[in-house]
Amino acid sequence: MALPAGFGSGGASVAGPSPLEVRLRRGGCVESVHRVHAVVCDQRGRILMRAGRPDHETFIRSALKPFQALPLLSSGAAEQFDCGEKGVAIACASHAGTPTHAREAFRLLWNADLEVSQLQCPVPIGASSPLEHNCSGKHAAFLATCRKMAWPTESYLQGDHPVQREVHRRVAELLGLPAAELVAARDDCGAPTLRLQLAQMALLYAHLGASTQAELEQISRAMLAHPELVAGEGRFDTELMQRAHGQVLSKGGAEGIQCLSRIGEGLGVAIKVEDGSRRAKQAVALHLLRQLDWLTPSGLQELEEQVLILNPGVSLEVEGALRFQEG
């Protein structure tokens, strides 16, 4: 999938700054090394800063969730079924499956006169209900949208279902691409996710933080108002948004995906760890937040102490930095 017109700076080569490296040291010796690509885009799709390849292609995984929530709003389902900000936030969540999270997902279903049995996300190991699955809010939002639009509920995860086609249409619109060019595959929860270039992910998050489109602004406002629903206590997205005072939105995905938005400035960041390491993506996110000056030093220290918990004698260090895109 080629970068659409407007990306980059007039056809600049993909050659450029090297990927970041995250090194785990044990007793002063390097034990593991993770290679990481990162890019900053504005809402016009211009690559402003980068480390590694902005055209690196991978699946966006759960970082797609804020955009999968768009049909809930555009269909009128969120208003009709009185979702409120909490309902929108849980629709965007990769949550911890606590009773609080399960209750919000259940409320989405209850208000739309839907049954828990209609959820097609798996029941997690050791759990008793699909409501405890980290994607239950997204699935409940899909079903509520289907109820409002009189679309079939039993096939809502199929790629050709109207709710999935609408997600793809909206994402393609934001990227300036024909929807037919998007490549989808099944995520672990059963819903489609998309294979995108890293710069395209950053562009999506630039739009999410720009506050220029009403539905995206509703989504970002809900996530920032209820960060505890988006992930959970002690989890990176929640802890970051609680310390950013409404200025930074954060949403991660599996296999080393992390996306950030700078609210009101139309800037998006996308991070991909080649080997999928969670600790590496969190270390890089902290490193870039420090470089971009998006979080206070005290907030960064608190966040690092909260999420990067390592055994004694073990440390993580990030080598490299974002570089400005050359014109």
Image: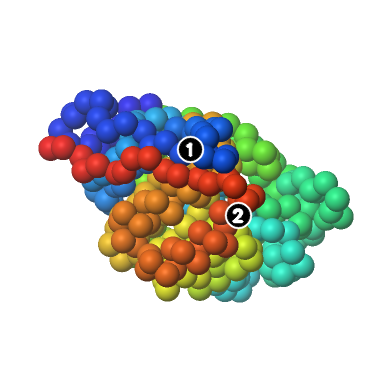
- Distance, label 1 to label 2, CA atoms, is 15 Å
Q: Which residue shows up at 73% across the image and 47% down it?
A: 121
Q: Which residue shows up at 62% across the image and 34% down it?
A: 186
Specify the quadrant that holds the N terminus. Answer: top left
Q: 10 Å neighbourhood of mark 1: few (<14), some, or many (≥20)? A: many
On screen, residue 228 versus residue 117, left or right, reads left
Judge whether residue 292 can be spotted in this image.
yes
Q: Looking at numbered disc 1 in the image, what kind of residue is underneath it? A: Arg
**Rendered image quadrant of residue 208:** bottom left
* Numbered label attached to residue 261: none
Judged from the image, the secondary structure of the residue bearing numbered disc 2 is loop
Q: Decide: is 137 above or below 326.
A: below
On screen, residue 267 versus residue 249, left or right, reads left
Q: Which residue is mark 1?
A: 23
Judge whether residue 146 can be spotted in this image.
no
Q: Where in the figure is residue 124, as x and y percent of width and height?
A: 79, 48
Q: Decide: is 151 above or below 302.
A: above
Q: Where in the figure is residue 77, as x and y percent of width and height?
A: 58, 64
On screen, residue 254 versus residue 219, left or right, reads right
Q: Which residue is mark 2?
A: 309
- Label located before the other in sequence (1 or 2): 1
Judged from the image, the secondary structure of the residue bearing numbered disc 1 is strand
Q: Where in the figure is residue 173, as x and y percent of width and height?
A: 36, 45
Q: 10 Å neighbourhood of mark 2: few (<14), some, or many (≥20)? A: few
Q: Looking at numbered disc 2 in the image, what kind of residue is underneath it? A: Ile
Q: Residue furthest left?
A: 327
Q: Which residue shows up at 73% across the image and 52% down it?
A: 133
Q: Where in the figure is residue 67, as x and y percent of width and height?
A: 48, 52
Using the image as rendered, state which of residue 230 and residue 276 is in the foreground.
276
